[in-house]
Amino acid sequence: MTINEVQAKILQLKKEKDICILAHSYQAREIVEIADFSGDSYQLSVAASKVSNKIVIMCGVRFMAETVKILSPDKTVLLSNPEAGCPMAEQMDKALISSVKKQHPDYTVVAYINTTAELKTICDVCVTSSSAVKIVKNIENKNILFLPDCNLGAYVAAQVPEKNVKLLQGGCPIHAVVNPGDVKKARDRHPGALLLVHPECVPEVVKLADFVGSTSAIMEHAESSASKEFIIGTEISIAEHLQYRCPDKRFYGLSHKLLCPNMRINTLIDVLNCVSGAGGEEIKLDEETIAQARACIDKMIELSV
Ligand code: 13P
Ligand code: SF4
């Protein structure tokens, strides 16, 4: 079978079975092409809350599929590849955060959406990389406990200096490894290019950037900019997607280290197996977890307007 034939089969089966396919922007080109929605974590969580299909397939990582299930408990939600987890989402568990909360009872607990459903049950509000600054600004309490990503948290703290932001030492093992030396190498190779980075990168890299934003914000900025060359400081798939979208511009990955094996484990064949009923994993969460985690996500949607 060719890629086009597999894509045609997926499109036919998804229509017949009333399936919606969501793909995070880090997914491979051939998956993004057959998705009903593709975008950053925030866009996918909003799309998930609005779709009317009975079955939703998430091409991304486990916490994203859990978010869909939390927002749509009556739907069948499938993670296209059961091995696709986000190591950052697993870094902190409920027992650890319960004890940190006891030590800081006057703090509002802000959880990056890259957390497990279980952890969300004891947090006050979720944020995504694109909504974090706005949401933290909108929280009444001055004291914020931000978890698990200390790099995104440091970026938010710098944008909202009026808040007292306490960080925990978690982070994305992919974004956190790029360093100012990688920036220097990329800038030396492409002296005319703008550097666009994700706030999951370390502050030393973030402060060298010409623009900081979520995956979608990076894509929108590159598309609308008058500049012609860009160094992309997030998962390298974004440089490729942008090259398809803007053939008259040039996109370079900041570093080959920016490859997320968790996101990239999903293949088009996984999606075919899922729509055929022979693959993926159905996400199951108990009612109490759904209700408590939902309060955290609903608060995010409420505070991001
Ligand atoms: P966004 O989609 O919010 O930019 O996050 C990037 C990411 O690492 C998702 O896991
Ligand atoms: Fe998790 Fe980082 Fe991969 Fe995103 S890029 S899924 S935060 S490991």
Image (spheres, grey):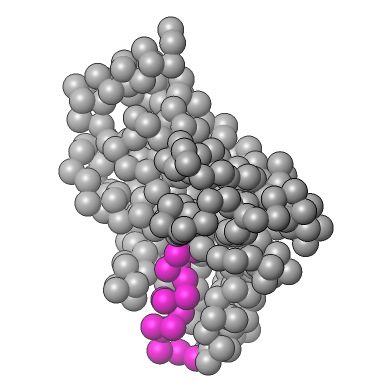
Q: Which quadrant is home to the N terminus?
A: top left
The extreme right residue here reads 181
Q: Along the horizontal axis of the image, is 117 left or right of 206?
A: left
**What residue sits 20% from the left and 30% below the top?**
18
| Residue 231 visible in the shown view | yes
The image quarter in which residue 279 lies = top left
In the rendered image, the vertical position of residue 188 relative to residue 20, given as above or below: below
Asked if the stretch drawn in magenta spans residue 197, the answer is no
Q: x, y percentage for residue 21?
A: 33, 35
Instruction: Quadrant for residue 268, please give it.
Output: top left
Rendered view: 105 above or below 113: below
Question: Which region is colored magenta?
Answer: 126-142
The answer to which of 128 and 169 lies nearer the viewer is 128
194 or 256: which is nearer to us? 194
Residue drawn at x 65%, y 41% as measured from the top left: 259
Residue at 58 percent across and 80 percent down: it is 157
Asked whether 139 falls inside the magenta stretch, the response is yes
- In the rendering, at what x and y percent does residue 95 appear? 60, 65
Query: Which residue occupies the foreground of this view, 124 or 232?
Result: 232
Q: Indicate the position of residue 115 as horizontal and vertical percent values.
A: 52, 58
Can I make out residue 99 in this image?
Answer: no
The total number of labels drawn is 0
Pick the quarter of the image with the C terminus: bottom left
Residue 175, image x, y percentages:
66, 54
Please identify the residue farthest to the top as the structure is shown: 1
Q: Quadrant of residue 236?
A: top right
Rendered residue at 63%/65% (across/down): 209
